[in-house]
Amino acid sequence: MEELELPLLGEAAPLWSLLLFEDLLPMVAGMRELGDEATRINLTHCYGAASELWGAAPGLSAYIPGWARRATLITRLQELLGSNTILLTPAPAEPPFEHDAGILDAAQAVEDRAPGDRVYRVTWIPR
């Protein structure tokens, strides 16, 4: 077993957020229209958390280089890990949140900075 420093994962996590939420953007209006109240609240909080990382509307100037950087990160991680295909990461430092916690309670979600922020703490992805 070898302990590795992987700062690339810390860079990849917010980059994933940018690419994911920008890819979903064309479908958000339909998701809001067809989804229930919890879906609409969740979308609001998720895009709110993403905007803290990338601004309200990052656009193509961030999106296109983001995909290029993603390819670079994948290549570097593959080179670093080589034939070691198992990556063990630390267990969460706090218990999992209750189902729908922070999603249906908008005031609590804002106080916690948004449900997406909790994901970073639970998965130990450095910010």
Image: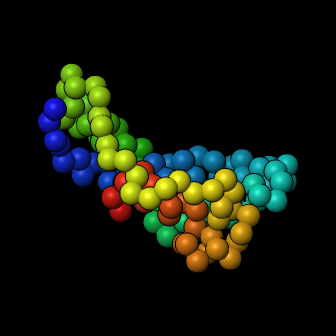
Q: Is residue 82 above or below residue 20?
A: above
22 displayed left or right of 73: right
Q: Residue at x 57, y 57 (%)?
A: 97
65 displayed left or right of 111: left
Q: Residue at x 54, y 47 (%)?
A: 20
**Furthest-left residue in view?**
2
Q: Nearer the viewer, residue 7 or 76?
A: 7
Q: Quadrant of residue 81?
A: top left
Q: Quadrant of the N terminus?
A: top left
x, y percent for residue 73: 30, 42
86 displayed left or right of 26: left
Number of numbered markers: 0
Q: Quadrant of residue 79?
A: top left
**Furthest-top residue in view?**
83
Q: Is residue 18 above or below residue 2?
A: below
Q: Quadrant of the C terminus?
A: bottom left
Q: Residue at x 23, y 37 (%)?
A: 76
**Furthest-front residue in view?**
95
Q: How is the image coloured?
A: rainbow
In this orientation, does residue 80 appear? yes
x, y percent for residue 36: 83, 54
x, y percent for residue 7: 24, 52
In this orientation, does residue 64 appear? no
Q: Residue at x 32, y 47 (%)?
A: 90
Q: Is residue 53 above or below residue 83?
A: below
